[in-house]
Amino acid sequence: MEALSSLIAGFSVLGDPANVLYMLIGITLGVLIGVLPGLGGANGVAILLPLTFSMSPTSAIIMLSCIYWGALFGGAITSILFNIPGEPWSVATTFDGYPLAQQGRAGEALTAAFTSSFFGALFAVILVTFLAPLIASMALAFGPAELFAVQLLAFCSFVGMSREPPSKTIAAMMLGFALAAVGQDPSTGQLRMTFGWYELLRGFNFLIAVIGLFGIGEILLTMEEGLAFRGRSAKINPRVVLQTWAKLPKFWATALRGAIVGCWMGITPGGATPASFMSYGVAKRFSKRGAHFGQGELEGVVAPETAAHAAGTSALLPMLTLGIPGSPTAAVLLGGLLIWGLEPGPMLFIDQPDFVWGLIASMYLGNVVGLIVVLTTVPLFAAILRIPFSIIAPVIITVCAIGAFTVRNALLDITFMLIFGVIGYVFKKLQYPLAPLVLALVLGDMAESNFRNAMVLSDGGLWIFWSNGLVGSICGLAVFMLFWPLISSGLKRLRSRRSQPAE
Amino acid sequence: MRHEDETGDSLLSNRSANILVALILIAVGGLVIADSLRLGIGWAEDGPRPGYFPFYTGLLIVLASLCTIVLTVMGRMGSKGPFVRREQFRDVMKVFVPTAIYVALIWLIGIYVASAVFIAVFMRWLGKFKWPLTIIVSLAVPFALFVIFELWFLLPLPKGPVEDLLGY
């Protein structure tokens, strides 16, 4: 019950009208970011992060996390009305959302999407409220070996869970670690991989990478697809909303499954995108009308949206308690914590209770506000999408360039952004996942120093990683996740061999 | 949008692109390994040397990329289709080249003027908009950005000779 009293204290942080205002700004900007191509949650937060340097950390995190919730809501709008996923996690929403819009049931589909997003988020926030203090108090006892083991688990989960080929996931991830190592070595002060180029002294900033990879890369991809917004019109009126709400309770089992899948994938950094696909697949298998999926089933909208939002929200649980972000956007928020001078991890719950519980309380309120905002403003955002791409694209590129510059006031960073844009375009086309690259870039220095400290403790022996039950089982799980692709294909082969003689 | 025959008019096949990128990554990994070796990958008196951790990241980049190449050559990875078709490549270049010029212009004449020029060129050339709208948008956006960043958040952005003339 300690969690509840902390939560109430958190809500008092929201008593400050300024924070509520930041929340509204954040949600509205977030929906806009989610709707526009080339601006996503991670990228939008990265661009706006420098603007928050002068704010108090609590207000800043409330605004930035609300941008994240807004972007999660916004992704559904483009998926349903335009058959263009505004965000990768809303790809699965197009499967049934767009057919519904074609049948003139866009209002129903949107209401279902927003409501199930809200349900997924709420489920995840409740989980965060009660699990976070427990995990944080456990993590207080962690030494460098345990911390590195948890980071290892996070990265190995990427290899095991990712839809991309493992060899490419590993290459992208290690590229992130290598880029993170560029510049001055934090422990010895020696220069690494600068090759005599003094501008590289400070290393690569992950915000630049995020803006380039997700922003510029996405614009190039959008251009290649020859994007033309020819969308369905959206009319949402209270009658449609109420009618849809009356239908939704039927899908409680799907929504619950979606929320559980989402939370699981959010906490182990699988992320919102695979969670939405997995939830869609599970719903299709379990539903009585599974065969009709893809032709415009409301249930097919509920499943991925619940999971995506639950995953997006629960991704903040490991970020707050262990300092390990469960998604690229959470990674950017984590980077923000470091910039504001806060040390992410279990100590946050003791040193900065206002910050942590203010954030958690804002997650409750932010999602309620978000639901109301999107339900009332859909036509407005749909109208924004009708602005031609040749106006939107240069404006977005300009905003990205300014965002890249303001991170460290360095012109060279704008050039790096462009290079990262090309990398993002090529990697996306060749199925190299971007999330592990970004996560490795954010966590690189931390993971490395944990590893080194562990090595110093053990005098260079790797035995420290199975020196006690806790660290041993985390490492064991990590190795299991790492080899999961091999294990699962092995199992499949075994099963097919066994079933063959029967046939 | 024209729909080409899936195999026709391809600039680069998906498989070749796969191998090409893997080769580039191997080169990058090699660079990381080389620099780590220079810094020392072993053990100093007070703990691991600076190259200790990066060495393994470089090594894994090389190994994973070799794996990608082998799987691609064996035909187990990468689709047969094109990586990019001529049409698509031209569309992408239409955005990329102006953006690259824009980034270069920022160095020369500051971000505000460069943005105005960039938006105007983009709208006029790719969007085929009439001059009045083009001029309005390309002036309004940098002005709005100026108000937000320079006046509101007090974040100075790169400026050039034009801003000097105006006294900023």
Image (cartoon, coloured by chain):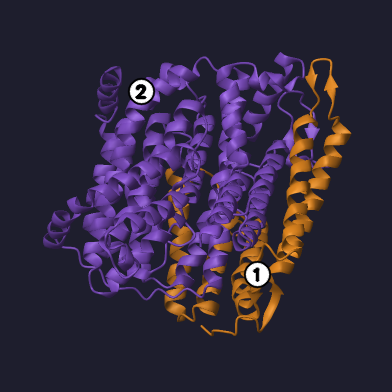
Chain colours: A purple, B orange
Q: Nearer the viewer, residue B155 or A326?
A: A326
Tell whether A65 sits left or right of A232: right
Q: Residue at x 72, y 15 (%)?
A: A458
Amino acid tagged 1 = Val
- Which residue matches tag 1? B97
**Mark 2 closeness class: few <14, some 14–19, many ≥20 residues within 10 Å:** many
Q: How many marks?
A: 2
Tell whether A271 sits left or right of A282: right
Q: Nearer the viewer, residue B34 or B168?
A: B34
The numbered mark at residue A354 is: 2
Image height of B51 relative to A43, above or below = above
Amino acid tagged 2 = Asp
**Mark 1 closeness class: few <14, some 14–19, many ≥20 residues within 10 Å:** few
Chain hosting mark 2: A
SS under mark 1: helix
Q: Position of residue A71 (x, y in %)?
A: 38, 51
The numbered mark at residue A244 is: none
Quadrant assignment for the N terminus of chain A: top left
Q: Nearer the viewer, residue A191 or B42?
A: B42
**Is residue B57 visible in the rendered structure shown here?**
yes
Tell whether A91 sits left or right of A206: left
